[in-house]
Image (cartoon, helix red, strand yellow):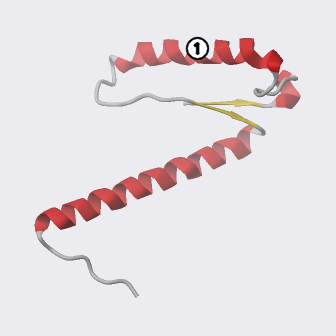
Amino acid sequence: MVWVNNPSVTKTTIYSDTSSDLIDEIKSQFGKLIEKYKVQLPESQIDYVIREGKVYREMLDEAREIGESLHCLWVRMALQDLNNSGLEAMPTA
């Protein structure tokens, strides 16, 4: 889950001293959502990220970061499977 603070809308930045109430509320709401849905998704880990900026740009950046993480995980799993099979990876040029 992602929440993006757009300072032009909220009139505060998440790094300012005045943002603690806002951040506490966001964390509280995400905590409630996690509690509600973790029973329905026992095999999943539910996480959240708090970002700041323009919503569209931050969502794109988060998706790219998640995609890169998932790609790295997939490559590691594939290499592990390959190592477990006793085969060797083909050399790359």
- Side of 35 where 40 appears, left or right: left
Q: From this view, report whether residue 24 is shown above or below residue 49.
A: above
Q: In the picture, residue 55 is in which quadrant?
A: top right
Give SS at disc 1.
helix
- Report the number of discs: 1
Quadrant in the picture for the C terminus: bottom left
Quadrant in the picture for the N terminus: top right
Report the residue at 59% width, 17% height from top: 27
Residue 39: x %, y % from top left: 33, 16
Residue 4: x %, y % from top left: 70, 31
Report the residue at 34% width, 31% height from top: 44
Report the residue at 31% width, 84% height from top: 91
Q: Which residue is mark 1?
A: 29
Report the residue at 43% width, 51% height from top: 70
Kind of residue at disc 1:
Gln
Q: Residue furthest bottom?
A: 93
Q: In the picture, residue 88 is in which quadrant?
A: bottom left
Q: From this view, report whether residue 11 is shown above or below residue 68.
A: above
Q: Residue furthest front?
A: 17
Q: From this view, report whether residue 65 is shown above or below residue 51.
A: below
- Side of 46 where 29 appears, left or right: right
- Side of 66 where 12 appears, left or right: right
- Side of 36 where 62 appears, left or right: right
Give neighbour class at mark 1: few <14, some 14-19, many 20+ (Cα, 10 Å). Answer: few
Residue 14: x %, y % from top left: 76, 26
Q: From this view, report whether residue 20 is shown above or below residue 48.
A: above
Residue 58: x %, y % from top left: 69, 42
